[in-house]
Image (cartoon, rainbow, N blue to C red):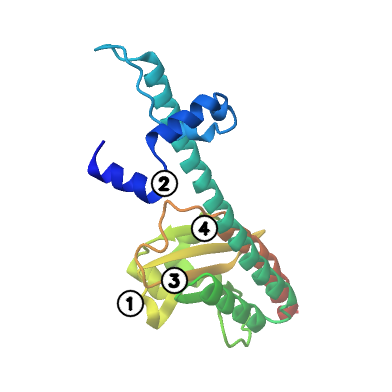
Amino acid sequence: MTQKENRLEAEQGLSEKDVSDYLACHPDFFLTHKALLEVMTVPHNTGKAVSLVERQTSLLRERNLQLTTHLSDLIDIARHNDGQFEKTKRMVLALLDAATLDDVAVAIEESLCRDFYGDATSLILFSEKPINVNNLRILPRETAGVVESLIRTNLPTCGQLQLIENRFLFGEEAVKIQSAAVVPLVKGEAVGLLAIGSYDPYYFQSSQGTLFLSYVGEVMSRVTSRILHEEQV
């Protein structure tokens, strides 16, 4: 026994013999403490041959570690999704309360910049008739040619945009925007575009999921289409 082991025994008041004697008196100890078996190493003397028991035990430990890690990842994802749901719910309720297009623009900017950490937002709606609004842009549909590819997808686009697209969407802030998410607003036809910009080139990436963005787009399409129709009557 090493000096360090002797010192530990003296400090803890427990020796290897104490443990051995205890286990001898309680042969069923590991039946009620099975978790210890998962972390214990019990050599199985087979000479130079590889013990099948040891190999199976090692594989089971590795598998247990993988499952534990996977479970931890699932819990993290569930927490993230729960947070996304609460933020989305707040934004949808704000949109449902909107009576004007300015109300819609304010609700979007506050939600996306505060809750979802976007650095800039842009809401562009298409209409042939001029409408007096302060916090968004109303344009004829034919003027949106530079972002036509973003509109025709009918699906959210994430990643780094071309400079000409950034300029159309974000105006003076275009040079700061390094990545963006663009959501087409569609209600039978193209209603407009919602764009969220970030100064971080990796904040929005083409590989990320767009379920949240699609849901926001569907809600916004209905709300803005209704208000646009009311404003034009």
* Marked residue nearer the N-terminal end (1 or 3): 1
189 lies left or right of 114: right
Q: Residue 156 — which label?
A: 4
Residue sitting at x 54%, y 24%: 27
Distance (Cα) linking label 4 and label 2:
66 Å
**What is the secondary structure assignment of the residue under circle 3?**
strand
Query: What amino acid does circle 3 point to?
Result: Gly
9 lies left or right of 185: left
Query: What amino acid does circle 2 point to?
Result: Gly
Answer with the quarter of the image where residue 3 lies: top left
Asked if residue 82 shows in the view, the reply is yes
- Closer-to-camera residue (28/81): 28
Q: Which residue is mark 1?
A: 175
43 lies left or right of 213: left
**What is the secondary structure assignment of the residue under circle 4?**
loop
Residue sitting at x 48%, y 70%: 196
Answer with the quarter of the image where residue 189 lies: bottom right
Q: Which residue is mark 3?
A: 197
Q: Nearer the viewer, mark 4 or mark 3?
A: 3
Distance (Cα) linking label 1 and label 4:
22 Å
Q: Residues within 10 Å of mark 2 (few under 14, many from 20)?
A: few
* Marked residue nearer the N-terminal end (4 or 3): 4
Q: Nearer the viewer, mark 1 or mark 2?
A: 2
Q: Which residue is mark 2?
A: 13
**What is the secondary structure assignment of the residue under circle 1?**
helix
Q: Residues within 10 Å of mark 3 (few under 14, many from 20)?
A: many
Q: Nearer the viewer, mark 1 or mark 3?
A: 3
Q: Nearer the viewer, mark 4 or mark 2?
A: 2
